[in-house]
């Protein structure tokens, strides 16, 4: 069974459009603003989406990026584990992270810390990484871990059980050029900026479109209008209209900042599929 849902609610740009970053992301955002841009190389996906907004010391910034590079890096299949309170067996030789060759340190940083700005610090109880492509961009000629079987490595008071095989893999290293654009110096000017950039005036609507919007408005600011029948002509017309207009930035999808009959709203449209 198909249907649809339409929601109209008040929209506060200074509260709803400013991104709530995770701590790891916030560290990168702070760097981007403080350093007037950051070129980041990482084995993961982009840590921050494009067109995100942040408030710093009373000033609003838009964070954008361009992916400027991508390369395949040699890697080896690796397994790593750590458990809180676990120590290496007495008959095992324990290597120290600080004494390892730089190529092995690089691989361990990826296995333990993950791609840069992707994790919220170290886990407190345990960590398990299996069948992971540990990167060796400088090759393995100097490695003490590759092909050595299961080894134990002490790093910052933690004993990691590590196995890095000779199996060839690849990992993708991407380059992202992040920029920070100053867009407003007050809540009032930020609201004006958002209005200029995103506000869409809903006009020349059909009677059917108006019926759908009015039903959503009548549902109240905390409600929405939902119809579990086949989408009505009004919804289909409204959906087609909005699909031709850029919506608000990620992570929101199918969200628009609109003006209707002189009032401003956050408009959300969803198609429903139910069995």
Image (tube, rainbow, N blue to C red):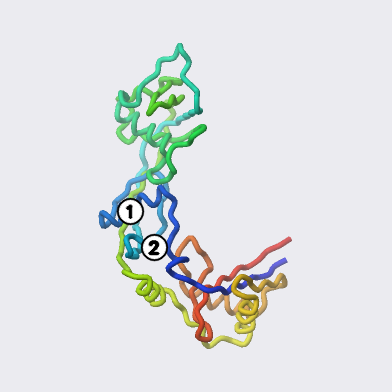
| Residue drawn 46% across the image and 13% down it | 90
Q: Is residue 16 above or below residue 69?
A: below
Asked if marks 2 and 1 touch (Cβ < 8 Å), the reply is no
Residue 258 seen from this side: yes
Q: Is residue 29 above or below residue 236?
A: above
> In the rendered image, which residue does mark 2 sit on?
53
> Mark 1: which secondary structure?
helix
> In the rendered image, which residue does mark 1 sit on?
30
Residue 163 seen from this side: no
| Residue drawn 38% across the image and 27% down it | 155
Which quadrant of the rendered structure holds the N terminus? bottom right
Task: Give residue 26's position: percent from left, percent from top.
Answer: 38, 52
The disc, 2 or 1, on the residue closer to the chain's N-terminal end is 1
Task: Give residue 194's position: percent from left, percent from top.
Answer: 40, 73
Furthest-top residue in this view: 91
Q: CA distance from mark 2 to mark 1?
A: 12 Å
Q: Is 200 situated left or right of 210 in this image?
A: left
Tell me the quarter of the picture where residue 180 sits.
Answer: bottom left
Badge 1: how crowded within 10 Å, few (<14), some, or many (20+)?
Answer: some
């Amino acid at each position: 069974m198909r249907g649809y849902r339409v929601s109209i609610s008040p929209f506060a740009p200074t509260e709803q459009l400013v991104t709530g970053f995770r701590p790891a992301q916030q560290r990168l955002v702070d760097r981007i603003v403080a350093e007037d841009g950051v070129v980041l190389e990482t084995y993961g996906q982009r840590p921050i989406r494009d067109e995100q907004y942040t408030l710093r010391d009373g000033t609003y910034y838009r964070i954008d990026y361009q992916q400027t590079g991508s390369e395949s890096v040699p890697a080896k299949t690796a397994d790593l584990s750590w458990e809180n309170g676990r120590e290496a067996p007495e008959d095992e030789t324990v290597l120290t992270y600080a004494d390892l060759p730089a190529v092995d340190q690089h691989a361990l940083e990826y296995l333990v810390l993950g791609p840069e700005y992707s994790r919220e610090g170290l886990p407190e109880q345990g960590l398990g990484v299996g069948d992971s492509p540990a990167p060796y961009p400088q090759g393995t000629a100097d490695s003490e871990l590759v092909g050595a079987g299961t080894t134990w490595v002490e790093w910052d008071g933690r004993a990691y059980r590590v196995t890095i095989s000779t199996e060839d893999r690849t990992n993708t290293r991407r380059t992202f050029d992040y920029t920070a654009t100053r867009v407003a110096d007050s809540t009032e000017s930020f609201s004006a900026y958002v209005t200029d950039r995103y506000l869409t005036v809903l006009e020349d609507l059909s009677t059917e479109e108006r019926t759908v919007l009015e039903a959503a408005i009548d549902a109240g600011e905390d409600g929405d209008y939902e119809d579990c029948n086949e989408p009505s002509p009004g919804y289909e017309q409204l959906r087609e209209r909005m699909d031709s207009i850029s919506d608000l930035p990620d992570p929101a999808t199918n969200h628009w900042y609109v003006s209707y009959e002189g009032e401003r709203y956050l408009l959300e449209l969803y198609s429903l599929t139910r069995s």
